[in-house]
Amino acid sequence: MRHLLTTKGLDSDTAITLLDVAEDMADVADREIRKLPTLRGKTVVNLFFEDSTRTRISFEAAAKRLSADVINFSAKGSSVSKGESLKDTAQTLAAIGADGVVIRHPASGAPQVLADSGWIDAGIINAGDGTHEHPTQALLDAFTIRRRLHGKASRGKDLDGVTVTIVGDILHSRVARSNVWLLAGLGADVTLVAPPTLVPADTSGWPARVEFDLDAAVDTQPDVVMMLRIQAERMHGSFFPNSREYSRRWGLDDARFARLGTDSIVMHPGPMNRGLEISSMAADSQQSTVREQVANGVSVRMAALYLLLSGDREGTK
Amino acid sequence: MTTAQRPPTPSLPTRDLPTHTVPTNYLIGGAALPDGTRADILLADGRIDEIGTGISAAGATRIDADGLVALPGLVDLHTHLREPGYEQSETVLTGSQAAARGGFTSVFAMANTSPVQDTAGVVEQVLALGEAAGYVTVQPIGAVTVGLKGQSLAELGAMAASRARVRVFSDDGFCVSDPLLMRRALEYVKAFGGVVAQHAQEPRLTEGAQMNEGALSGELGLAGWPAVAEESIIARDVLLAEHVGSRLHICHVSTAGSVDVIRWAKARGIDVTAEVTPHHLLLTEDLIAGYDARYKVNPPLRRREDTEALRAGLADGTIDIVATDHAPHPVEAKDCEWDAAANGMVGLESALSVVHASVVANGLLDWADVARVLSQTPARIGRIEGQGHSLAAGAPAELTLYDPAVNRVFGTDDLSGKGVNSPYLGVTLPGRVVSTFHRGYPTVLNGQLQDASLIADAGRESPRG
């Protein structure tokens, strides 16, 4: 694997390999010394053009557990805020000798441009680009679902026949896009539920059904319900009348949560708006995987860094 | 242009003419005219002196045009020359050179310069820069509103009465979205035979828009530019033009729905004309999948169905002309992430080949149609004199020789402007502009752009109008 830019086009064998490596990494977390020497001497740069403390520290922990040197480059207060281009930033990181770049960027496609540009010869991991993709989030979600379903027997398994309902702002969600491609690619049966204003113009090519009625979706007793965060800026774009109406129609409140089967998994990529898209009862229940998702994120990101950066990378000398 | 409306160039001090002065008598032998007949064409004193077979002329420079198509000099109703203000992108001189290289003898220079072409002084400056360059007739377009801000009318009458004789007014880059202001502009330009060229883009429906709204924009996570944002403005404006009895031109039509609306308006007798760009005839949105910013343009590349509707509309006359929307940018404006990149493509040098590839090679248009959509009709819409005449004795010597038989991989060597933001680099395109004649002298000869100082001299010395 040269880069990890999207889950679209990631074949299921590669995805399962990555999830299996993540299982190995998770085992490391249970040891007394939680550190592997694998990436000793490698430099990983966390290049964050958007604030995201959660994702950055997850990648930082992952890289450090693999003994890589980590440089955190935040756009705020840096040369980027003084107008430096992505090209100049990338060439600066190349000159420093970055082996891997974890990039979070508000522009969709920025990681792809970085990977194709020739500005820098490093492995690129997309840590979320605009409203496009967030592949490590989808991988940790798949990992979490697989572990809930199969426990210690997860290795080698796909998600064949698992029913997943993703609820919320699909239009602007990179988490939703990455999950649609990955989970469907692993065999899951994916349904999207959202207000019509928050569904992309044409999803006919997506391996997912689109519905508007959360109650009907809940009553199908899906194996997984994944709630997406509603961003504050959507409140003012006339996507829906107000947060209360959104919550009434598309929130996982106590009543809807109670109607889910007791085996249903409730997921949220965080940070949560409690009482808006998810009730505290749902978020704090045994069925909620919110905290597991955070822990699994480190394992999955360790696996991605390992596959990209250990040994001779494909396509490089 | 006539001497009555544009004063003759002041006489130059007497001097010995340099020996390298460009001759102005040319005998073009054996060219195919747009209607397919073969003819010799004698150019003398800035005019077509004679056209027919078996012409001989002592002293004329003979040019063999066997196998070449002779077209009236191409006229581009939509060019961004960037000067004054954005000289790092293009100047009137370099844009004129790009135009000549593409077979153009006249370009209409869009108003979004800095300062904006919204006063008589600025349009006269652009006119003078074009005259000094000498490669093509540079006809300035005037802004509709002060500073392109869409708030109050610019001095349209002053620009019309200026030495630049502005007849086309446009806020291109921005839509005149205020319906009352658009109505007033359409009414006001009737006083001097003007036309408002509308950049049809409903601003609220396209806030932050990055590409055509559809399946691909959803997948790529790029904010959508819906077709309805163009079509709704065109529908409004054709009805306004009908209501006030004025003339409307629609810039860069890009959607199948727009073609339908314009077809309906024309059937109703509304005085509307429309243009399509070469890139909207040939390229589709799927090129954007790798986020290569060379494909970022406004209006955006659309679907295959739109391209086909635009081609059909051009063939049946619903769309009147092809105009390039030549939009040069410095390298750094494209060498970046998609959202940060500038909109626009250079198009002058490739236009004729792209029209050839998209609508001539498949038989939708013949060369007479090409002469119509790339020369005669744009000159008529823009009310420019000395351009867009059929090739006939007595017509101004404005013509282009095109070799339709070759195929070539388009590259930066084919570009003569400052911008290299062409979507066709590395693409095999048919045909090649061999020579371009403007006011009787060659600006491009055998594929070679002629030297700038020679052309400036030729421009000063040849009779105007």
Image: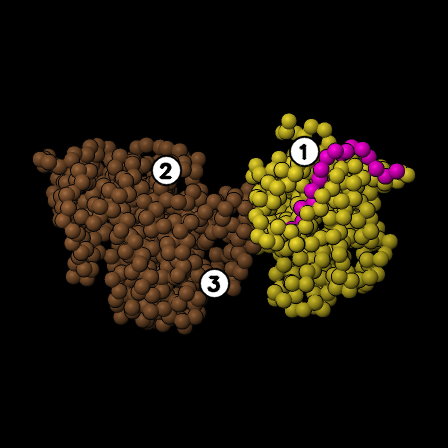
Chain colours: A yellow, B brown
Judging from the image, mark 2 belongs to the subunit labelled: B
Q: Position of residue B184 (x, y in %)?
A: 36, 72
Instruction: Please report the residue visible at 65 percent of the width from the left and 34 percent of the height from the top.
Output: A2
Q: Are marks 3 and 1 in contact (CB under 8 Å)?
A: no
Instruction: Please report the residue visible at 73 percent of the width from the left and 31 percent of the height from the top.
Output: A310
| Mark 2 vs 3, N-terminal side | 3
The three-letter code of the residue at mark 2 reads Asp
Give the magenta-colored segment's residue range: A33-49
Q: Give the spatial CA distance, label 3 vs label 1.
A: 44 Å
Q: Is residue A255 left or right of residue B131?
A: right
Q: Is residue A168 left or right of residue B177?
A: right
**Quadrant for the C terminus of chain B in the image:** bottom left
Instruction: Please report the residue visible at 27 percent of the width from the left and 70 percent of the height from the top.
Output: B191
Q: Main secondary structure of the magenta part?
A: loop
Q: Position of residue A119 (x, y in %)?
A: 58, 38
Residue designated by label 1? A1
Residue designated by label 3? B202
Q: Residue B157, located in which quarter of the rendered image?
A: bottom left
- Is residue B242 in sight in this rendering? no
Residue B414's disc is 2
Q: Position of residue B355 (x, y in %)?
A: 35, 43
Q: Give the spatial CA distance, label 2 vs label 3.
A: 36 Å
Label 1 environment density (alpha carbons within 10 Å; few <14, some 14–19, many ≥20): few
Q: Nearer the viewer, residue B429 or B319?
A: B429
